[in-house]
Amino acid sequence: MERVVKLFQDNGLVVAFLCVGVIMLFAEVISKKLTRGKVPAPAIAIVAGLVLAYIGGDYSGGKKGIADLPLFQGFALMGSGMLRDFAIVATAMGASVVVMRKTGLLGAVSLIIGILVAFVFGVAIAYMWGIRGAVELTTIGAGSCTYIVGPVTGAALGASSEIIALSIATGVVKAMVVAIGTPIFARSIDSTIHILR
Amino acid sequence: MVIYGVALLAFSFIGGQLMGELLGEALNIDANVGGVGFGMMILIFLKQWLSVKGFFRESVSEGIAFWNNMYVPIIVAMTATQNVKAAVSSGLLAVLVGIIPVAIGFALIPYLARFIKGKSHDGTGS
């Protein structure tokens, strides 16, 4: 048994690949079967990550979530700032200048207003909640843009892991609300436009 | 070769991080300002440029596509290593900040659409 534990510890990153792969698989099945695709699989997987982090922290009393358990140390390397930023830059692959142009002025204005509204109101709500530090407020506000911008901003500013966790949770809630809400609200927005005209 | 794609991504990443450091220094902020964003812009630009030149082959693209697909799993791993236990007491804040700005955003869409429609009717040519 001791040798098995050592094997897991020595190959932490590979163990993390396996575990996250299993999480993603379950998230995809839950997304498809239980929510009929309404809640996106990544959001479910990130909720699973939050739960694992809670369990890890509760079990070990540490601050690094699941990575405080010797068997799952590799999560820290897989989720490190370096790999995270590397993968985020890679997502620019999917960006197409042609498609960006197609969305035109409406797309550009929506993008800017969308970010501004999320950030400003995110910061305002966090302030009303009693959070005061500029770094903490900015990280929560960024989390209200997306669950990626939150942790990237928080890490760049040196926010605590606790605040980063909050900003991820914020972003996940937002992603779920948008994913579920958009099809529902699309009709009423459409009819409101008709009334406004 | 796949490594060319990975190296191209690495070049964009490091270039972006350097620009972020420079901007941070210029603004007198002790942080990397926008390094990831600059990296993405460099990658988009290089991809476009290499495609036009005919150097952006399938195998090169695969080296970047792999990391593109690893993005969500890496975020899941990162999430699992945060101090969630300490954050749970403020969990309701995450729910509020996740919902309220989105609701405001939805409410703004009709006005935004009307504004844009008015603009494009002004004869500025859309």
Image: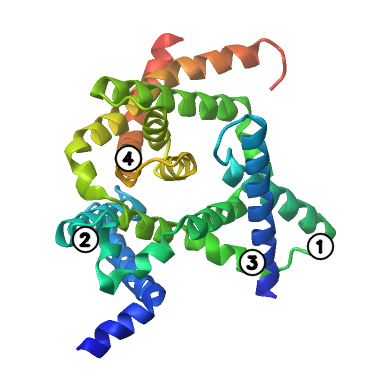
Label 4: few (<14), some (14–19) or many (≥20) C-alpha neighbours in 10 Å: many
Q: Amino acid at mark 2?
A: Gly
Query: N-terminal of the two: label 2 or label 4?
Result: 2
In the picture as drawn, the residue positioned furthest to the right comes out as B53
Q: Amino acid at mark 3?
A: Val
Mark number for residue B119?
none
Q: Which marked residue is nearer to the observer: mark 1 or mark 2? A: 2
Same chain for the residues under marks 2 and 4 in the image: yes
In space, the residues marked 4 and 1 are separated at their CA atoms by 45 Å
Figure disc tally: 4
Q: Determine which residue is flagged by label 3.
A: B6
Which residue is pictured at 62% across the width and 13% down the height?
A: B119
Q: Determine which residue is flagged by label 1.
A: B54
Which residue is pictured at 36% across the width and 35% down the height?
A: A182
Q: Position of residue B69 (x, y in %)?
A: 49, 62
Chain identity of mark 2: A
Same chain for the residues under marks 3 and 1 in the image: yes
Label 3: few (<14), some (14–19) or many (≥20) C-alpha neighbours in 10 Å: many
Q: Amino acid at mark 1?
A: Gly
Q: Is residue B120 left or right of residue B102?
A: right
Q: Position of residue B50 (x, y in %)?
A: 78, 58
Chain identity of mark 1: B
Mark number for residue A56?
2
Depth check, front residue: A162 or A177: A162
Q: Determine which residue is flagged by label 4.
A: A163
Same chain for the residues under marks 3 and 4 in the image: no
Q: Secondary structure at mark 2?
A: helix
